[in-house]
């Protein structure tokens, strides 16, 4: 098989072409290469298919984005399904001002074959305490959604005898016709207009749901929030969304967006926990050790070495939160802050000033101190 050409090359366009330019290029090339216009040319059909495929992709925002990213090797496979592009039913008239969008939209999105329409997906937000990020939890929520009507079991009718197949579509809900233009045959399937795609006519509709087969109901859903969860994570509960119309087809899905409440002192960076620890000047100078209650149930002991500076960070590996999808826990990072008393009595001021002989004052060779500090900072940065 010859290698597939770049869609932009096929239409003779640059990558930045606007929608209008794409439409214009396709109309003009497709008119020229339409098989009806080139009955003697055996290549015309494949050339026309190539043009139409390129247009189908580039005129659809989603498909164009995928193509721009992955080229012909999109991870989901061909957007036209396993058989690839089969041609499209376009007459020469369509190429002069016809509604091309309507013809091409059949490939993507809503009209994807004979699959039954699924019920709508729903989303709810759910808040959990910070502790959940450590331990995970089992939760239960109650919410209201359109569900299969209990009284008629989704059938929409009071009694089975009042339901008859729609005469227009023979109960299939869909109308199918085969169109042939030039060398192409195309099966066009659409919802039956008489029964709105349902395939049935209900003469005696159910009182509870008025024949729709669905009613608003409150239901409980239990779910597991995994340890390591962070805000914005969405849990998907298959089949817990809205019921499909007329009780036929699958229910939609329920998405639960988790919001993790904050902690009193921890800030979170993925599975790492950050906190500030105020330490008095004497403890920074002489060293100490501080015990803090922790979210994993065991106190953490922060060892502050003698001669520590405010701003120094002490890392405690393996005591952060569990990572999502992995067993490894992050670290706790403790940043030391100097704890300055907010007020000092006259008597204390006197006692502190008596320590000048130990601690020094700024009157001592200040330039040398600044030089030493700059040197220390430079070296700590290199390391
Ligand atoms: Zn009902
Ligand atoms: Zn019908």
Image (cartoon, grey):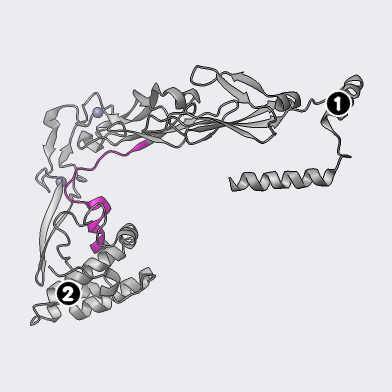
Numbered tag placed on residue 47 in the rendering: 2
The answer to whether residue 259 is magenta is no
In the image shown, does 226 or 344 lie closer to the viewer? Answer: 344
**How many angstroms separate mark 2 from mark 1 (CA)?**
93 Å
Q: Which residues are magenta?
A: 103-122
x, y (%) of residue 353? 89, 27
Q: Crowding at label 1, few (<14), some or many (≥20) Cα neighbours within 10 Å?
A: few
State the residue at coordinates (80%, 26%).
342
State the residue at coordinates (25%, 24%).
150
Is 51 left or right of 315, judged from the image as shown?
left
State the residue at coordinates (71%, 24%).
286
Quarter-of-image position of residue 135: top left
The quarter of the image holding the C terminus is: top right
The quarter of the image holding the N terminus is: bottom left
Numbered tag placed on residue 355 in the rendering: 1
Asked if the residue at tag 1 contacts the one at tag 2, i.e. Cβ–Cβ closer than 8 Å, the answer is no
Q: Earlier in the sequence, mark 2 or mark 1?
A: 2
In the image shown, does 270 or 112 lie closer to the viewer? Answer: 270
Is 12 left or right of 333, judged from the image as shown?
left
Is 373 left or right of 164, judged from the image as shown?
right
Residue 34 visible in the displayed image: yes
x, y (%) of residue 366? 84, 43
Name the mark nearer the viewer: 2 or 1: 1
The count of marks equals 2
């Amino acid at each position: 098989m010859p290698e597939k050409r770049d869609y932009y090359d096929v239409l003779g366009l640059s990558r930045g072409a606007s929608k209008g330019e794409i439409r214009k290029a396709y109309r003009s090339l497709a008119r020229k290469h339409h098989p009806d216009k080139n009955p003697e040319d055996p290549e015309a059909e494949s050339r026309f298919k190539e043009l139409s495929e390129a247009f189908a992709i580039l005129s659809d925002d989603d498909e164009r984005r995928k193509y721009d990213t992955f080229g012909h090797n999109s991870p989901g496979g061909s957007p036209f399904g396993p058989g690839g592009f089969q041609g499209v039913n376009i007459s020469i008239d369509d190429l002069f001002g016809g509604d091309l969008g309507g013809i091409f939209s059949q490939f993507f999105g809503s009209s994807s074959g004979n699959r039954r329409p699924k019920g709508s997906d729903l989303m709810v937000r759910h808040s959990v305490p910070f502790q959940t990020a450590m331990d995970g939890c089992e939760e239960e929520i109650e919410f209201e959604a359109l569900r299969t009507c209990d009284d008629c079991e989704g059938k929409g009718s009071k009694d089975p005898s009042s339901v008859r197949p729609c005469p227009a579509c023979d109960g299939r809900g869909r109308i199918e016709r085969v169109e042939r233009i030039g060398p192409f045959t195309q099966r066009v399937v659409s919802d039956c207009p008489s029964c709105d795609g349902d395939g049935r006519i209900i003469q005696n509709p159910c009182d509870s749901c008025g024949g729709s087969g669905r009613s608003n109901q409150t239901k409980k859903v239990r779910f597991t929030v995994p340890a390591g969860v962070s805000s914005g994570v969405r849990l998907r509960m298959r089949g817990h969304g809205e019921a499909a119309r007329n009780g036929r087809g699958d229910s939609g899905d329920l998405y639960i967006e988790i919001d993790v409440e904050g902690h009193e002192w921890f800030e979170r960076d993925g599975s790492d926990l950050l906190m500030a620890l105020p330490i008095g000047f004497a403890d920074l100078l002489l060293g100490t050790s501080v015990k803090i209650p922790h979210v994993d149930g065991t106190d953490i002991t922060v060892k502050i070495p003698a001669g520590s500076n405010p701003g120094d960070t002490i890392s405690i590996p393996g005591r952060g939160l569990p990572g999502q999808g992995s067993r490894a826990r992050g670290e706790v990072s403790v940043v030391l802050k100097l704890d300055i008393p907010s007020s000092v009595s006259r008597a204390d001021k006197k006692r502190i000033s008596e320590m000048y002989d130990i601690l020094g004052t700024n009157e001592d060779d200040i330039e040398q101190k600044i030089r030493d500090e700059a040197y220390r900072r430079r070296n700590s940065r290199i390391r």
